[in-house]
Amino acid sequence: MKKTLRPDAAITHFQTEGVCVSCREFGSGHINSTYQVKTETGKTYILQRINKYVFTDPKAVMENVGAVTQYLRDRVTDPTEILNFITTDTGEYYYVDEAGEFWRCYEFADGICLEAPETDRDFYESAIAFGRFQELLRDFPADTLHETIPLFHNTINRYRLFKEALARDAAGRASSVQAEIDFIMAREDEAGTICRLLETNELPLRVTHNDTKLNNVLLNRETRKAMCVLDLDTVMPGSSLYDFGDSIRFGAATAAEDEPDLSKMCMDLNRFRVYTEGYLTACRSLTEKETELLPLGAKIITLELAVRFLTDYLDGDLYFKTDYPEHNLVRARTQLKLVADMEEKWDEMQKIVAEEAAKH
Ligand code: ADP
Ligand code: GN1
Ligand code: MG
């Protein structure tokens, strides 16, 4: 079998300015293999090997990224707002090595990438970035996009896959997670609410980002204002509720996504308000129903991700990158604790959304 290229060899196939002088692993994404490359001319790039287990059609991913970045570039005045990919020496979006691995290269966007907001302002600015992203894509022709991961945020289907993994019990771990299974199954009906409302058109299907955690956005180094939205691999038709919700899940949480001490994991209501304010300021086209259901978006996406982490744990850790054997289980438990805390703060979350919506 042919070997996968080393990143410092893969980069030579792209039209970079100058020759690569350093190459190191970069960032904390859970999916792709990401490297920061510097060249002799002082230019910096991001090189990525696309995860083919997750994205079974990398060509479709890059076609989407190409179409979306072009569309956005035509609608903004500052080009640094938009992710800029570098073509290969034959003018393609990606390079395929002898082992069939897909590589792509972006210009390095020199902004601040955070794992948790340092201030309310940071979180507000991330809401402006994702809200504006949503607003700019309002009229993007959805039917021209590939569905890069079929049924990605279809929570009903996520439950189906979870039950299948449970029945297979491929890694022999099911018997040790009964409490988590019970918590998840007790919420199955509610978890399907957004899918059902999309089905009946009570919620609009939009072109959404679908992976709106804080480390997928950059803030400007000098001004700390919203700068650039990253990780466009999952831009496809979806619901604004999942986009809003995923930002809350990650950035309004009081602990990291994989914090093992559950007592540290809660929903920070002040941060919830800050994000809501920013999102409603930048994204003006939400319907009344979407706005009203924003808290539900936060709860369902958190539950959905717990289901996904636990499914992967049951399957033997095939999907998400993990640092230790129980990592996916810890992540799932932490998400479930966050869901439980949202349930306790439910009335306040709804009140905050109503108050912020009344200002707009
Ligand atoms: P994954 O799907 O694995 O999360 P991402 O595309 O989000 O991959 O990249 C992982 C990390 O690499 C990001 O969180 C960010 O820190 C960094 N990154 C990605 N693209 C760029 C870019 N063009 N400029 C600067 N940093 C980037
Ligand atoms: C993955 O790719 P990354 O690390 O930005 C995942 C998201 C999860 C997130 C949890 C394509 O995001 O759906 O919410 O991990 N992306 C994909 O941190 O599955
Ligand atoms: Mg990412």
Image: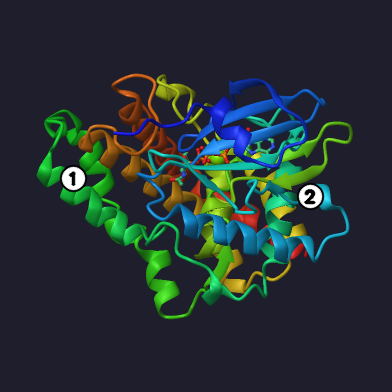
- Which residue position is annotated with label 1? 165
Residue type, label 1: Ala
Q: Is residue 262 above or below residue 61?
A: above
Q: Residue at left 60%, top 53%?
A: 93
Q: Nearer the viewer, residue 12 or 38?
A: 12
Q: Residues within 10 Å of mark 1 (few under 14, many from 20)?
A: many
Quarter the N terminus occupies? top left
Residue 200 spot, x, y in % from top left: 41, 80
In the picture, the disc for residue 76 is none
In the picture, the disc for residue 81 is 2
- Asked if the residue at tag 1 contacts the one at tag 2, i.e. Cβ–Cβ closer than 8 Å, the answer is no
Residue 131 visible? The answer is: yes
Residue 254 visible? The answer is: no
Horizontally, is 197 left or right of 17 in the view?
left
Disc 2: residue Cβ within 8 A of ligand 1's nearest atom: no
Q: Residue at left 15%, top 43%?
A: 166
Residue 202 spot, x, y in % from top left: 48, 78
Residue type, label 2: Glu
The answer to which of marks 2 and 1 sits earlier in the sequence is: 2
Q: Nearer the viewer, residue 222 or 72?
A: 72
Quarter the C terminus occupies? bottom right
Q: Is residue 6 above or below residue 126?
A: above
Q: In the image, ligand 1 is in what quadrant?
A: top right
Q: How is the image coloured?
A: rainbow
Q: Nearer the viewer, mark 2 or mark 1?
A: 2
Q: Quadrant of residue 317?
A: top left
Horizontally, is 10 left or right of 319 in the view?
right
